[in-house]
Image (cartoon, rainbow, N blue to C red):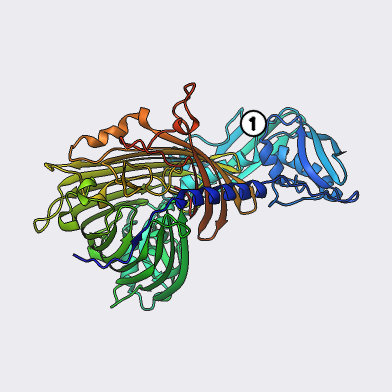
Amino acid sequence: MARGHDASVRAGPRAAGVRSVRLAALVALLLAGGGCLRTRGTPDEPVIVSLEFEGVKEVDESALRAKLATRASDRFAWGDARRLDPDALALDRRRVVAFYKERGYYRAAVEDVQVLPEGDGRVRVVIRVREGSPVHVARLDIEGLDAAPEARAKAGSLALGQGQVFTWAAFDATRVQLQSALATTGYATGTVTQAALVRGAEGAAEVTYKVEAGPRLRFGPISVIGTAAVPEKKVVAQAARQVKPGDWFDERRLERIQARVFELGVFSGVRVSRGPPDPELGTVPVVVSVREAPFHTLRLGPGLGFEPSRWEALGQVSWTHRNWLGDLRQLKLDLHGGYAWIPDPFAPIREGVVGKASAEFTQPGVFGDAVDLSVKIELEKDLQQAYGSFSEKVSFGTPFRPAPRWTVVPSYNLEIYQLSDVVGEISDLPGVQNCPQEQCLLSYLEQRVTWDLRDHPLVTTEGLYLSLSLQEGFPAGGLGYTYFRFVPEVRYFTPLGSRSVLAARARLGAIVPINESGAAPIVSLFTAGGAASMRGYGVERLSPMVNKEGIWVPTGGNGVLEASVEVRRKLSGNLVGALFLDAGNVSEASGKPSQFNEVLDLSHLQFALGVGIRYVTSVGPIRADLGCRLPNDLSAGVPFSQRFPTVPGDSGHREPILVFHASLGEAY
């Protein structure tokens, strides 16, 4: 058993007081920084305090604001103070009329623009609009589509229809629909032209689309341009997974080829296009143009991470070879190490050196062209609130993509943990009983499946993300734990107007022991709380707890349930604000197969309401969130501190109700 862990455990009466003072100072700083903008201009260039509209009913007012050069100053101290420009305001009158015309209101007009004083050097701009009635489509003709019956069926219901309000967006969208229907049903050379006669005074429009379908074509041969060290056959094999010569031409498959080839990880640029059609053979060749990237990458950098219950300072070195020993084999070596403090360096109760070293090897196309091989070895020295550990992990996986946006990763995993500096008597901690001599072993098969329909993985504005992880644990070498584990998760994103996004997430986790007398090893139990979890708690602090030597230690449980709803709204420039409601619960730990069912009792969910700010960068948003747990007992006469729920279990312990989080990337 590996010991010699240099983490220390210290507790003192000053810890809670110091953290309370820091939290109060932080809240005061946030309030001071969030003060209202009070900048003043001059009589010639006053600051615009507000931009108001009168008579705007039939269009999206926020979208109209976004089209104008005249804008109100930001409300907060860190925002911009915008001054009145009379020339820009005069042009904005035309922009308002053009905005309405694009949406079918050809008789809209700006009746008046007022600039009203709001004190010295400050003005309020009011724009009064007369909308009028919209133009409707009186006649809609589509010529030539009967020559392509497959495209006609594919087009379905069009964006613009007879009797509807004529808008330029729907007018153009219908042409795109018809063009896409041709391009995805074999008519690769088909064209669509459009024309509209709009009689604004009469409120009527006549619309015509002319379709020239051309011959119906099939996919032809696949060729590659730009390879040097990368075998051309590897690129062709990836492309051939999406198209087969002889299939009817479908423009969408070219994008799938491009994504699949780029995922090989050895190209800095990939472009897939169709070659000149062969009328005699009735085919369209596919041309894959690539630009090879450097095969070696070395990255160095420091890092600082902090949560309410853990701070750490780290350095990292990463080296990747994307064509190791040829045939696109990839080798990645990672090393990072540093120092961690729990909960923080100002009043730590536990601290020590942490680090991780890993090597990952990937062989594409090891079983045919569809299935890859991934092998990863990892050594880690870690520090948790209940224990320190040194672990060795190895994983063998065969990831593959059965269809676009689908990923399946079956694997075998072996993890061995040597625990050290366990808080209190080891026999009293649930989840440690199945770690004989402070050694925990996990041996399991895992299947991870994801279906990702998001528009962007880092800054998502719409889409759906579904994932499912299954594990089947079994002993190895006389050690281990027999269990079944499943973790389904769903995320949903939808725009709310032009500046806001509604995001939602739900996650369930369950460990089902099989013929076991005690709880699963503590390293495998569920906890919740943190920047990417229930933000009313610090990292892993939503959990059953035990008090050891004056320290409240999370022990984890068999089940976890988390849910969240968040509205993200663009404020100014790269700044995004957020309002969120999180919910979560964790069951107790035991050897009972049905123990996880505790989290399915929704009456025990705990809630937190919070606000956040994000600064969007090329590597993802830098995020700060402040979560406040909500009370569950509003009865008369109950002390304020006891109105809030205790942590799961029967310990009776309550965590702080305000928690600040800082992180890189969205919560989900």
Residue that lies at the very extreme toward the front in this rendered image: 13
Identify the residue at image location x=38%, y=64%.
Answer: 261
Q: Nearer the viewer, residue 145 or 235?
A: 235
Q: What residue is drawn where x is 81% and y is 50%?
A: 83
Q: Compared to 128, does 235 lie above or below?
A: below
- Relative to 566, does residue 250 appear above or below in the rendering? below
In this picture, residue 40 sits left or right of residue 273: right
Left/right of residue 205 with respect to residue 548 in the rendered view? right
Q: Quadrant of residue 319?
A: bottom left
Q: Which residue is mark 1?
A: 165
> The disc labelled 1 sits on which kind of residue?
Val
State whether residue 480 appears in this view.
yes
Helix, strand or loop at disc 1?
Answer: loop
Q: Is residue 241 left or right of residue 93?
A: left
Residue 543's x, y, as percent? 34, 42
Residue 554, percent from left and from top: 33, 46
How busy is the neighbourhood of tag 1: few (under 14 within 10 Å), some, or many (20 plus)? many
Quarter the N terminus occupies? bottom left
Q: Nearer the viewer, residue 204 or 469?
A: 469
- On the image, the x and y values in percent for residue 284 come to 41, 59
Location of residue 224 with respect to 525 vertically, above or below:
below
